[in-house]
Image: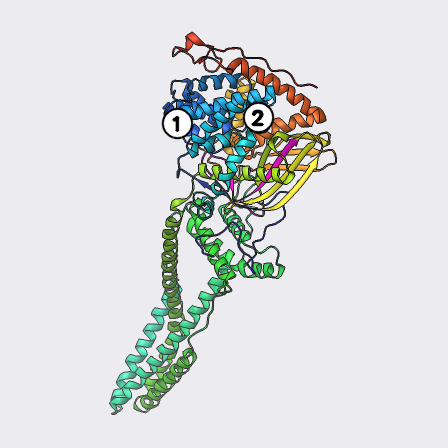
């Protein structure tokens, strides 16, 4: 496995890709530490006050499955004057996206009426033709509900126009009208879309690019600055004193040897000194290696527990580093092979500790962990690559000296004894008084000189080794950074991720329909939910965007005449692989409740200041809420729950945004949770399943009556009519939506209420 490209889950020994069980009931999967991309794609940030910019960002929200925000921004752009067939087309899609027909109200019909003014099936402009297809599909839907089936000729004509649209327009219409179209119309669309879906799911080199969205943005690495060499004054004093004594001894001894009449003997103390230096040099090397070993072993020891330093709302930098490193290594840990898991734990622990210390040492002064995230992942993959390839991933430091080091020390000692001993024997008869002074001075001086010299050498050697190691590490990381930038150059945008996810959900829905042998004519309504799935799914998001996960659990609920069919699978997002199929069937009267639960921490003991006490209750509450959010004291999470009377529970979790994935300067966690609910499909599902839980087996009859009333309202507002005059005030009435004008309404034929 390449260190710069990793699959969503590593291959286990033996080549099998392993997933953990699907979380059921209250069980939640562990979620990998996430990544947030800043301004890489600039999808959801309005760069200016122009209406065109609002429209651009609104379209990006629509592509990202944030329908409510998309409808708001595109609608504001349209009603304030940024009118065109393109804007009207995307506004209509935003109004209809992710909704069933009974989810629409009078205001929505007014918005659709304003948008459909630009529909023209005969226009050469693709936006007018695409909008005309949407408008006519809605009319066919109303006719289908009224008569049981749309007019075949009219529907065939609409489908022919649909087929003539560009592929991108066809996919947009199929994608965003998937919840609102049903019966034979949806069967026809599915038949056309299914042919393309199998190919489109993996379009855009998904297998080679999707994983890159979950990679941290590479940041140029920082060079570690080793501490400077610091030698104690005592060591320097010992070197000076010892050096003076040794020099004095040689100064006294050499003249005596010269007077001995044998000039060659002058070389004896020189030979002895060289022997001393050789022995000391080799010994210093041994000590330097030993200290290097001790330092490396110390770096591989666990960091002290610093949980007592910070309070419950604050984490130290080292604690965040440990959390990140542990999460990265846990992602690749073998899960089904217990012996391999134990070996992994034993071999990875010292590597994790050393990596933690390195990251803390280099990045703690800056106080930001984000620049180091990609580096932690790269080091982790280096370990994984070696470990899974059978190489010794845990490279334990060694203090082994060169094989001749001990022999060199022994020879140096022998040379020192021979040289200095011979000099003493020859010098003593010539001048025993000088010799008695010189030899003790030499012996006494060698001790502090050797001790102090050892301390000085080891400290400067430590610094030189640290500098060399830091330079080597920096070069290695810089090369990895350059490679990673090239690899991530084609990272997919958030819109592409949302498009792939929508195709996956459509694929899973079709799988469920085929498994239960159902056609859309037999399904009154359906909803598709998704949540992080598998074990340790990676997560990532862009600023102002919803979270994306490397593995999803996709749940499909098919509401039929005889009950509810539930179908769920795991989807590996990087490859599109579907696995771990689960099925469940129950009657309508078996549903006990459906709803969204919110978990939060509220701080209610704030002391009101003089300014706060002067505010009304609503303003004070807003002030407190904003203050708490800015301090990070509110932690939100939401879950969709569908409970059955037999205590079975379907739980879909919406991720907490207080785990390093929020830019608190530019983002509001409450808005992000709404985006997450839209992206997970919960907003649309809640409207349907809450009604089912409340009405039980009577839901079908009541749903049919509600649809009939909705279609009556639709026909009254948007039934067949002559195109409006350019002066819309002459043909329409004033809408409550931002004071804009709705086209003239022609009352259509009322639709009969179904029996029962």
Mark carried by residue 705: none
Q: Is residue 320 above or below residue 109?
A: below
Q: Given this view, does label 2 or label 1 mark the residue nearer the observer?
A: 1
Q: Is residue 588 left or right of residue 547?
A: right
> Which element is circle 2 on?
loop
Residue of label 2: 100
Residue 520 is one of the magenta-drawn residues: no
> Which element is circle 1 on?
helix
Q: Position of residue 560 (x, y in %)?
A: 66, 31
> Residue 252 falls in which quadrant of the image?
bottom left
Which span of residues is magenta-colored? 535-559
Q: Is residue 650 left or right of residue 396?
A: right
Q: CA distance from mark 2 to mark 1?
A: 26 Å
Q: Is residue 575 above or below residue 153?
A: below
Q: How has the structure been colored for display?
A: rainbow
Q: Position of residue 255 (x, y in %)?
A: 26, 84
Could one spot residue 387 in this view of the protein?
yes
Q: Is residue 23 above or below residue 641?
A: below
Could one spot residue 678 in this view of the protein?
no
Q: Position of residue 726 (x, y in %)?
A: 38, 12
Q: Is residue 656 above or below residue 425?
A: above
Query: Which of 750/103 is in front?
Result: 750
Q: Is residue 688 left or right of residue 676?
A: right
* Callout 1 crowding tier (Cα within 10 Å): few <14, some 14–19, many ≥20: some
Q: Residue at x 40, y 29 (%)?
A: 56
Q: Residue at x 67, y 25 (%)?
A: 700
Residue of label 1: 126
Our reading of the magenta stretch's main secondary structure is strand
């Amino acid at each position: 496995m390449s260190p710069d490209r990793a699959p969503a889950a590593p291959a286990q020994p033996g080549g099998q890709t392993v997933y953990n069980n699907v979380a059921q009931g209250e069980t939640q999967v562990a979620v990998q530490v996430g990544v947030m991309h800043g301004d890489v794609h600039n999808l959801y940030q309005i760069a200016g006050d122009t209406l065109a910019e609002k429209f651009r960002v609104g379209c990006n929200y629509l592509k990202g499955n944030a329908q409510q925000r998309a409808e708001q921004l595109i609608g504001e752009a349209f009603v304030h004057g940024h009118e065109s067939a393109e804007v009207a087309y995307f506004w209509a899609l935003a109004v209809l996206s992710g909704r069933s027909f009974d989810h629409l109200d009078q205001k929505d019909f007014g918005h659709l009426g304003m948008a459909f003014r630009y529909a023209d099936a005969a226009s050469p402009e693709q936006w007018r033709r695409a909008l005309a297809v949407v408008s006519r599909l809605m009319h066919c839907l109303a006719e289908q509900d009224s008569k049981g089936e749309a007019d075949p000729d009219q529907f065939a004509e609409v489908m022919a126009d649909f087929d003539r649209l560009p592929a991108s327009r066809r996919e947009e219409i199929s994608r965003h009208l998937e919840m609102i179209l049903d019966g034979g119309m949806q069967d026809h669309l599915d038949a056309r879309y299914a042919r393309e879906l199998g190919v489109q799911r993996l379009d855009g080199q998904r297998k080679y690019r999707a994983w890159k969205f979950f990679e941290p943005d590479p940041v140029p690495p920082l060079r570690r600055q080793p501490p400077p060499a610091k030698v104690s004054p005592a060591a320097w004093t010992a070197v000076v004193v010892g050096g003076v004594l040794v020099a004095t001894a040689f100064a006294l001894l050499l003249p005596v040897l010269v007077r001995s009449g044998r000039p060659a003997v002058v070389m004896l103390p020189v030979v002895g000194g060289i022997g001393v230096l050789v022995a000391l040099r080799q010994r210093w090397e041994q000590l330097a290696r030993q200290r290097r070993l001790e330092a490396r072993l110390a770096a591989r020891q666990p960091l002290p527990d610093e949980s007592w330093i910070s309070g419950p709302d604050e984490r130290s930098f080292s604690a965040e580093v440990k959390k990140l490193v542990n999460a990265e290594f846990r992602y690749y840990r073998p899960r089904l092979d217990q012996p391999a898991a134990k070996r992994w734990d034993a071999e990875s622990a010292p590597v994790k500790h050393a990596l933690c210390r390195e990251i803390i040492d280099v990045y703690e002064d800056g106080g930001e962990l984000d620049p180091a995230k990609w580096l932690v992942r790269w080091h982790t993959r280096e370990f994984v690559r070696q470990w899974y390839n059978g190489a010794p991933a845990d490279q334990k430091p060694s203090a082994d000296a060169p094989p001749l080091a001990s022999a060199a020390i022994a020879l140096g000692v022998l040379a020192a004894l021979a040289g200095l001993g011979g000099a003493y024997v020859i010098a003593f008869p010539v001048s025993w008084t000088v010799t008695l002074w010189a030899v003790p001075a030499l012996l006494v001086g060698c001790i502090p000189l050797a001790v102090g010299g050892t301390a000085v050498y080891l400290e400067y050697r430590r610094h030189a080794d640290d500098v060399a190691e830091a330079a080597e590490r920096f070069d290695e990381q810089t090369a990895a950074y350059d490679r990673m930038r090239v690899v991530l150059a084609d990272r997919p945008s958030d819109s592409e991720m949302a498009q792939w996810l929508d195709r996956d959900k459509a694929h899973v829905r079709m799988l469920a329909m085929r498994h239960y042998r159902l056609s859309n004519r037999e399904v009154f309504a359906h909803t598709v939910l998704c949540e992080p799935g598998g074990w340790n799914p990676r997560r990532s998001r862009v600023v102002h965007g919803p979270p994306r996960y490397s593995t999803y659990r996709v749940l499909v609920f098919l509401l039929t005449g005889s009950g509810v069919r539930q179908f769920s699978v795991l989807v590996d997002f990087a490859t599109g692989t579907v696995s771990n199929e689960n099925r469940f069937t129950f009657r309508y009267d078996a549903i006990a409740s459906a709803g969204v639960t919110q978990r939060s921490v509220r701080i209610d003991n704030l002391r009101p200041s003089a300014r706060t006490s002067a505010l009304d209750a609503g303003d004070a509450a807003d002030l407190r809420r904003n203050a708490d959010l800015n301090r990070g004291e509110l932690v939100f999470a939401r879950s969709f729950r569908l409970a059955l009377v037999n205590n079975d529970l379907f739980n879909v979790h919406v991720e907490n945004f207080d785990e390093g994935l929020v830019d608190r300067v530019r983002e509001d966690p409450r808005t992000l949770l709404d985006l997450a609910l839209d992206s997970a499909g919960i907003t649309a599902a809640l409207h349907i399943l809450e009604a089912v839980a409340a009405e039980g087996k009577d839901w079908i009859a009541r749903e049919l009556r509600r649809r009939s009333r909705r279609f009556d309202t639709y026909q009254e507002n948007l039934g067949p009519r002559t195109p409006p005059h350019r002066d819309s005030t002459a043909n329409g009435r004033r809408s409550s939506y931002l004071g804009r004008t709705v086209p003239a309404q022609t009352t259509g034929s009322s639709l009969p209420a179904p029996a029962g």
